[in-house]
Amino acid sequence: AQTVTQSQPEMSVQEAETVTLSCTYDTSESDYYLFWYKQPPSRQMILVIRQEAYKQQNATENRFSVNFQKAAKSFSLKISDSQLGDAAMYFCAYRSAGGSQGNLIFGKGTKLSVKP
Amino acid sequence: SAVISQKPSRDICQRGTSLTIQCQVDSQVTMMFWYRQQPGQSLTLIATANQGSEATYESGFVIDKFPISRPNLTFSTLTVSNMSPEDSSIYLCSVEVIGAGTDTQYFGPGTRLTVL
């Protein structure tokens, strides 16, 4: 079975600085997807970024980028120029690419605080 | 992406009663999922709602406790039956969008349930 591990329960960053959130996963599959979701206090789960395992190029969305290391099974999220609105819980998630296994497997989350 | 709404957004219920949560999507989707997020925890998949057939439940979740309906490609309901305080959680539905091959799930705003 696949597992997702986020080893940082809480992180803090100064406004305008850069922070990196860690995520590792375990799988025997070769084709899969990885995601980062953000959950602010409103509890809405918001997709931040998505990575296909077969792509070597790291995904980027504006201030958000990932460092995807397939061999190491690592998928970290970098937030540049942090803003107060980035404060939230961040969840790393895994999804199998094949068959009907469409459900997401989530890590326990990292609570990010942004200091003004 | 897709616009997803859930009703109710929150509710406070008495032990032993049942609550039905609705999930409505603004476009046709193949797969709909129901997740539970217990206080301070990550998301756990309850079941996959299949259109025209029985829902597929994850280990630890049973149909008698969490009956699910999926009458068409844009709507699903989750019922939390015979509630106890341990059922106090946020319940979220998510969808995967047809045709775009995105393999990406988008979430509704969630239903915060408190059982007294």
Image: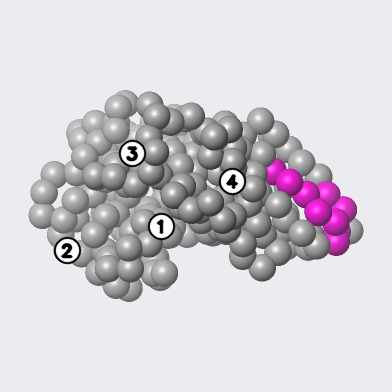
Q: Position of residue A99 (x, y in %)?
A: 24, 44
Q: Is residue B12 visible?
A: no
Residue at the spot 69% in from the left edge and 43% down from the top edge: A21
Task: Please name which of the two marks, 1 or 3, marks the residue nearer to the observer.
Answer: 1
Residue at the spot 47% in from the left edge and 59% down from the top edge: B109
Mark 3 nearby-residue class (10 Å; few <14, some 14–19, many ≥20): many
Q: Identify the magenta region.
A: A13-21
Disc assigned to residue A68: 4
- Which chain's residue wears label 3? B
Which quadrant of the rendered structure holds the N terminus of chain A? top left
Q: Residue furthest bottom?
A: B26
Secondary structure type for disc 1: loop
Task: Please name which of the two marks, 2 or 4, marks the residue nearer to the observer.
Answer: 4
Disc assigned to residue A46: none
Q: Tag 1: residue type?
A: Thr
Q: Tag 4: residue type?
A: Phe
- Which chain's residue wears label 1? B
- Which chain's residue wears label 4? A
Q: Residue furthest left?
A: B52
Of mark 2 and mark 3, the one earlier in the sequence is 3
| A106 with respect to A11 (left or right) | left
Disc assigned to residue B104: 1
